[in-house]
Structures are given as C-alpha cells and as structure tokens.
Image (cartoon, helix red, strand yellow):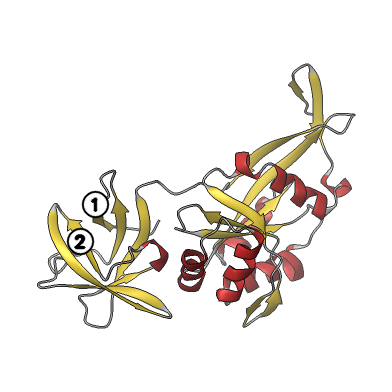
Amino acid sequence: MAKILHNNIWYSPVDSRSIYEIDYEKKILANAESLFPGYVCMQFKKTVESIYGVAIPDLVLIDKDYREWIIIEVELEHHALQGDVEDQIMKFAAGQYTEEHARYLVEKNPTLEYEKLKTLMRTMQPRISVMVPVSKPAWSNNLLKHKATIAVIEIWGDDTGRYLMRVNGDQPIVLKKTFLTNVFRGTITKKELTIENASVLPDSDLMQIYIDSSFSTWKIVRTAVGAWLFPQGKSPIDELSALSFKLLVNDSGDYILEASKWHH
C-alpha cells in the first residue's frame, strides 16, 4: 500500500467508502484557502431550478475579481454516475440563477459585493467541478457533455486522526490577472460586442479600449439579461476576422481587446 512520510509520521490513503460526504466536504472547506487561492469558497445549499428539475449544490467558488464562478458537486467513490452524479450536473449546467442566489451567498458572507455577484450570476453560467476522493476516469466523457470537470482530492490519514490532502485531476485554477471576460461579435448591428460577464465592466457609460495599439471609445449598454459595447464612430473591428475576443486590463488600468481563436 502507498504511504506518505511527513515530519516522521506515516500517512496512508483513507478508504473513501469509510468517509461521510459531509465530513469530506468539511475537510475541503477547512483547507479552501490553500486549495483554491484566488477564490472565495463557501457552502451553496440553495435550490437551483432547471428544465430538468431542481437540485441543491454543495459548494461554490467565486473568483475574487468576479470574473467567473464555479459550482462544486462533492461526490464519493460509490456514488453512481447515471441517475445520481450526472443528473445533478445536468441540472446545474441548465440552472436558472437569480438575485435570490446572490443574496443568499452575500448573507452568508458579507465580504462579497452583492451587485457584482448578482450581475455575474445573472449573465454568466457557472463552470462545474465534481470533486471526488479517488480518480474516476470513466466519468470524464459523460461530464464533459455538460462542461463539467473532475478534481481529485484524496484524504491520507495517520492512526491518530491527523490527515493530509493529495490533489490531482482538473483542479480549479484562477484566471490570469489581466483577463476580464470573453467578448463576442454581436448580432444587432454586426458592429457591437456582446460581453460574456458584465460584472467586470466599469460603472461609467463609456469605455476606452485599445485594439491593436489604436485607441477607441465604446458605449456600454446594459439590460437585465446582459451588456453590449457599441463603437462611437467607425467600428475598429470591421477589418478584423476574429469572431471572439478577450477583454484584458494592464497594470496601468488600460483596457485592451485582443482577438482570440478560442474561449478562455
């Protein structure tokens, strides 16, 4: 059997069938700052409605700059993929997230900014991470259909109750500091840009953006369902072939639009 020697103490892998899911979840929460730097991690026991029915998540990760959020479904080794794990993930992927979900999280953690969180949850669907104590490669293809990934967090213990955590798989990785959001060509006038995540936009109605080192001004239009950028004057993207872009910010606070061949 594999063992880990740490500070002259031997640790062995804990049989996941001997762990209660709530205890595994508590261990993840207790070590969240080390496991998920750059994110706020907390319980998210709020009903999510979808066309497939309702479900309740376990945890949530919120990027500290409100650029993305990730629903975490905690599962154990003996849980079935069909009818259990995949059913939950399908509901989260198609979930309807409202200001009630944002208010619930802010009430549990007042350090969160309600307006930014509400906008993030309203305009951007979450990524989904399934966290398990043992590797489950057979689940990968089914979960990828719902854009969900698998993160392995193993528990290793000694004979006195002390434990270590060993991580593997697709662990959540915080976005690069310069990245704000993905941006796409719009369909209204063919000149506007559709913003994937409106919570990262400045509070003003106008926005100055550099595109290929050229300075341009854009008007921000916000609605209950999203946000768009409309060029003031000739569109600086008319000559570009890219269909999607990344909105970045540099150390000086300048906004930059960069053509992208794929989404982040």
Question: Where is residue 154 drawn, in percent x and y?
Answer: 73, 41
Q: Quadrant of the C terminus?
A: bottom left
Q: Which label belongs to residue 254?
A: 1
As drawn, 15 above or below 207: above
Q: Quadrant of residue 221?
A: bottom left
Whether residue 17 is visible here, answered yes or no, is yes
Q: Which residue is located at x 56 percent, y 55 percent?
A: 111
| Relative to 56, 234 lies left or right | left
Is the residue under label 2 in contact with that under label 1 (CB below 8 Å)?
yes
As drawn, 51 above or below 198: below
Identify the amino acid type marked 2: Gln
Sort mark 1 into few (<14), some (14-19) or many (20+) by Cα contacts within 10 Å.
Answer: few
As drawn, 93 above or below 27: below
Q: Which residue is located at x 55 percent, y 58 percent?
A: 112
Question: Where is residue 100 drawn, in percent x and y?
Answer: 60, 75
Question: Where is residue 73 drawn, in percent x and y?
Answer: 68, 59
Of 222 and 196, which appears nearest the observer? 222
Dot placed on the residue nearer the N-terminal end, 1 or 2? 2
As drawn, 212 above or below 228: above
**Element type where label 1 sits in the image:** loop
Question: Where is residue 252 drawn, in percent x and y?
Answer: 25, 45
Q: Which residue is located at x 31 percent, y 68 percent?
A: 184
- As drawn, the residue found furthest toward the front would be 110
| Relative to 119, 87 lies left or right | right
Identify the amino acid type marked 1: Asp
Of 263 and 121, which appears nearest the observer? 121
Whether residue 134 is visible here, answered yes or no, is no
Q: Which residue is located at x 65 percent, y 55 percent?
A: 42
Which residue position holds label 2? 208
